[in-house]
Image (spheres, helix red, strand yellow):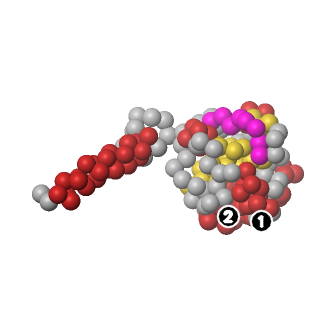
Amino acid sequence: MSVLRRRLWPALVLVVTAAVGTGLAAGLGTPDRSAPVGASTGDPAPPIAGTTLDGGRFDLADVRGHPVLVNVFASWCGPCRDELPLLAEAGRQGQPAGLRIVGINLRDGPDAVRALLRETSAEAMTVVPDPDGTLAIGWGVRGVPETFLVDRDGRVVDRRQGVVTRQWLEQRLGPLLAG
């Protein structure tokens, strides 16, 4: 082994060990198949409680009796940016039937989120920041965007991984708002 290789070998081992350790600490290791998946259809909705982006308080338990659309998003997510105007429109149309739109903002800064909400006309959305991802993990989120529909009894009735479409919203929200 050359002198250069002998000197670089310990550094390479250190870098690989650090990368593997960081990945495991971030939850990127082998998934625990015995752990609950989060918000499954028919199950009670996991909790969402905390200080909102505008400084108020939100607790999902306080809106029981209302249909709720929960959207997990981030300002750095292009598809999230694309779907927010559609969610804002759904919120305006569903408001007379009591629809609440709640965003869980994943690992973001408040200024970036406020700018995104202004850009997408989604300022009316109640946003609960989730800087460390704890709320998203509780809901079983695998990536952003992800959307959940919660009925008036507080049960998850549908879940969409990826971008919602107008058709998906019309098909899923219609029955939820009528009930």
Dot 2 alpha-carbon crowd within 10 angstroms: few under 14, some 14 to 19, many 20 or more: some
Q: Would residue 125 appear left or right of 138 to someone viewing this image?
A: right
Q: Is residue 116 visible?
A: yes
| Quadrant of the frame with the C terminus | top right
Choose between 178 and 126: the one closer to the eye.
Answer: 126
Instruction: Locate residue 58, reporting x and y percent.
Output: 77, 37
Amino acid at the residue labelled 2: Arg
> As displayed, is residue 71 above or below residue 166?
above
Residue for badge 2: 81
Dot 2: what SS? helix
Q: In the drawing, what numbered circle is on residue 119?
A: 1
Q: Which residue extends farthest right? A: 96
CA neighbours of label 1 inside 10 A, class few (<14), some (14 to 19), many (20+): few
Label 1 and label 2: CA atoms lie apart by 9 Å
Asked if residue 68 shows in the view, the reply is: no
Lateral position of residue 68 relative to residue 145, left or right: right
Residue sitting nearer the eye, 109 or 140: 109
Q: Is residue 126 left or right of residue 4?
A: right
> Mark 1 and 2 residues: CB-CB less than 8 Å, in contact?
yes
Q: What label does residue 17 carry, if any?
A: none
Based on the displayed image, in which of its 4 quarters is residue 112 positioned?
bottom right
Q: At numbered mark 1, what does the secondary structure look like: helix, strand or loop?
A: helix
Q: Is residue 51 above or below residue 103?
A: above
- Mark 1 vs 2, N-terminal side: 2
Residue 144 at what x, y percent from top left? Answer: 58, 55
**Residue most toward the left?**
1
- Where is residue 117 shown, x and y percent of the image? 77, 59
Q: Which residues are magenta?
A: 46-53
| Residue at (78, 33) in percent of width and height | 62
Q: Residue at x 76, y 38 (%)?
A: 51
